[in-house]
Every structure is written in C-alpha cells, then in structure tokens.
Amino acid sequence: MSDSRILSVSYDETVSEYRRGALEKAGYDVVATTDVKEASRLLAAEQFNLLVIGHRFSAQQKGDLIFQAKKCGPIPVLLICDASSDPDLPVDGRVYALQGMEGLVTEVAKLLPLTTAA
C-alpha cells in the first residue's frame, strides 16, 4: 500500500474530481467519493493515511466520518472549512475552502509529507 493514500469526501462530484486531480498531481494516491456512507464503508474496508472532509457536510456527518476514521486507526483528518471552522470537531488540520487547491495541497503536505526515494 502507498504511504500517501488519501480518502477525500466532497459534497459535489465536480469539486470531488477537482480535489482529487490536484492531490494526484501533487503525488498522492487518492480515492474520492461524494457519499458519506460509502466513505464510512471505505474507511472500514481499506487503509488510508489521511481523510479529507469537505466543507458542505453537516456537523453531524463530519463528526460521524471523524469517529469512523479514528475507530479504524490513527488516521489524521483534514477538514475543509467555510466561514465556520467547526472548532468543536477533533481534527488534525483545517484549511479554508477559499484557499483553493494550493491551500489544500499545502495543508495535506503538512499532515502527510511525501517521501522521495533516494
């Protein structure tokens, strides 16, 4: 398994594909979905090194995904935020949606640095 495997959960299919493309271009192995139940199933069935949760889900949905990730192992969680940063959610990092793909890739790299072969 790649040590740079990310599960990205976004509300919108277009946004999901855009985020996946940006992260793959940066060198990450990305599985993207727009379905919270599918994301929970994937977390239970497969191994990931980072969970990225989009900003348009309810606090309950975000909390459920975070709980599932932590139940499956020590998986860092990056929350994409809108005007509210959801300060009560126990995540490892936050990035504002307005920071765009560059901000997303920068914050992902802080939680999941890519290793390069010598």
Image: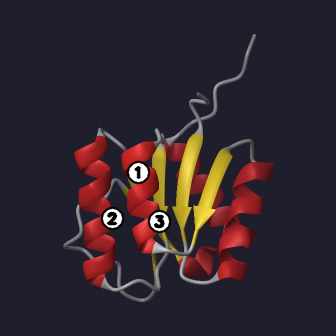
Q: Tell which tag, 2 or 3, sits nearer the viewer.
A: 3
Amino acid type of disc 2?
Leu
Tell me what residue is drawn at x 61 percent, y 30 percent.
2
Residue pointed to by mark 1: 43
Q: Nearer the viewer, residue 40 or 75?
A: 40
- Looking at marks 2 and 3 on the same chain, the residue that comes earlier in the sequence is marked by 3
Q: In this view, which residue lies farthest toward the left?
A: 88
Q: Is residue 22 above or below residue 3?
A: below
Q: Quadrant of residue 27?
A: top right
Residue pointed to by mark 2: 65
- Looking at marks 3 and 1 on the same chain, the residue that comes earlier in the sequence is marked by 3
- Label 3 sits on a secondary structure element that is helix
Whether residue 31 sits left or right of residue 56 in the image: it is right
Tell me what residue is drawn at x 41 percent, y 83 percent.
57
Residue pointed to by mark 3: 38
Q: Nearer the viewer, residue 5 or 117?
A: 5
Amino acid type of disc 1?
Leu
- Looking at marks 1 and 2 on the same chain, the residue that comes earlier in the sequence is marked by 1
